[in-house]
């Protein structure tokens, strides 16, 4: 018996790091969301005017991506990297039985989501947040944790290195320091409150996170957490 490889297509935002990773994983076909030309925009505008149902409307970015998917397909699985949490009808029509959503944000407000055969969350926290806030709890939600290159955390430090790093960030030799890498979420705010740390330093850390957030991230969302941490 010969195992037939599963053909997977990933729809991803067009970013340099994403393109670099796509080169490493050639077994997965990646379609990047790119700015479409005028013909796509006009055709999609007409199509969206014709389709009055909200789920049938697709942005020009996703409309162009779907054309590329159909040209390169067929695929056994199509994964939407972020994007609309409610599956777009044209994508559902193409691969509804194996259309998956990769969840890597915290859905904090009630929302509708239908059409995905599975949601893949990067953490239990986000998976539970999806289950709690989704008004259509019919989608199978699974967790696949993000991979970590542990070699980045295996570097040895001398005592002099430790002192220099602490001095650089204004920590005393005996200060308790908690490191965190990731999005600012409610559980982090609660943990920082329990630590009863220096609010000025916590706010400084949060402002740094705010400055390094992506340009399309809601800044007000982060500022709300900054204010909570600084209380």
Image (tube, rainbow, N blue to C red):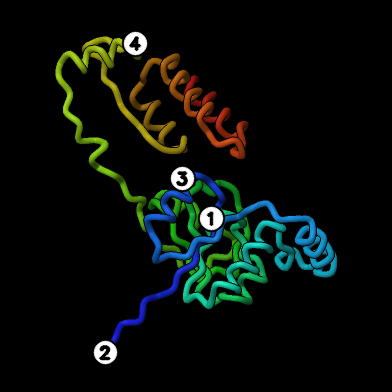
Residue furthest bottom in the image: 1
Alpha-carbon span between mark 2 and mark 3: 38 Å
- Find residue 48 and report its horizontal and vertical position in percent: 80, 64
Q: Residue at x 67, y 62 (%)?
A: 64
Residue 170's disc number:
4
Q: Residues within 10 Å of mark 3 (few under 14, many from 20)?
A: few
- Find residue 21 and report its horizontal and vertical position in percent: 41, 51
Of the two numbered discs 3 and 4 on the same chain, state the one appearing first in sequence: 3
Residue annotated with mark 1: 12
| Residue 163, above or below 68 | above
Of the two numbered discs 1 and 4 on the same chain, state the one appearing first in sequence: 1
| Residue 184, above or below 47 | above
As rendered, which of 191 and 2 lies closer to the eye?
Answer: 2
Alpha-carbon span between mark 4 and mark 2: 63 Å
Residue annotated with mark 2: 1
Q: Residues within 10 Å of mark 1 (few under 14, many from 20)?
A: many
Of the two numbered discs 2 and 3 on the same chain, state the one appearing first in sequence: 2
Of the two numbered discs 2 and 1 on the same chain, state the one appearing first in sequence: 2
Of the two numbered discs 3 and 1 on the same chain, state the one appearing first in sequence: 1
Write down the quadrant of residue 73 in the picture.
bottom right
Q: Residue at x 50, y 44 (%)?
A: 16
As rendered, which of 46 and 72 lies closer to the eye?
Answer: 72
Alpha-carbon span between mark 1 and mark 4: 39 Å
| Residue 229, above or below 98 | above
| Residue 87, above or below 227 | below
Write down the quadrant of residue 27 in the picture.
bottom left
Q: Residue at x 56, y 75 (%)?
A: 95
Residue annotated with mark 3: 17
Alpha-carbon span between mark 2 and mark 1: 34 Å
Q: Residues within 10 Å of mark 4 (few under 14, many from 20)?
A: few
Secondary structure type for disc 4: loop
Of the two numbered discs 4 and 2 on the same chain, state the one appearing first in sequence: 2
């Amino acid at each position: 018996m010969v195992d037939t490889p599963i053909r997977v297509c990933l729809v991803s935002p067009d970013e340099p790091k994403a393109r670099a990773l796509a080169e490493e994983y050639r077994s997965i076909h990646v379609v990047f969301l790119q700015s479409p030309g005028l013909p796509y925009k006009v055709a999609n505008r007409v199509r969206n005017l014709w389709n009055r149902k909200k789920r049938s409307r697709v942005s020009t970015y996703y409309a162009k991506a779907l054309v590329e998917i159909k040209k390169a397909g067929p695929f056994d699985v199509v994964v939407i990297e972020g994007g609309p949490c409610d599956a777009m009808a044209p994508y559902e029509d193409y691969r509804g039985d194996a259309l998956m959503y990769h969840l890597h944000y915290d859905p904090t407000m009630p929302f509708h989501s239908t059409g995905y055969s599975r949601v893949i969350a990067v953490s239990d926290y986000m998976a539970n947040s999806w289950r709690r806030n989704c008004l259509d709890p019919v989608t199978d939600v699974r967790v696949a944790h993000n991979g970590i290159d542990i070699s980045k955390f295996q570097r040895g430090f001398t005592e002099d290195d430790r002192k220099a790093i602490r001095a650089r960030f204004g920590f005393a030799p005996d200060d308790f320091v908690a490191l965190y890498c990731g999005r600012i979420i409610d559980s982090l705010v609660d943990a920082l409150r329990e630590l009863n740390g220096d609010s000025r330093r916590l706010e400084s850390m949060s402002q740094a996170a705010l400055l390094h957030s992506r340009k399309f991230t809601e800044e007000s969302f982060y500022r709300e957490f900054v204010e909570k941490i600084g209380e």
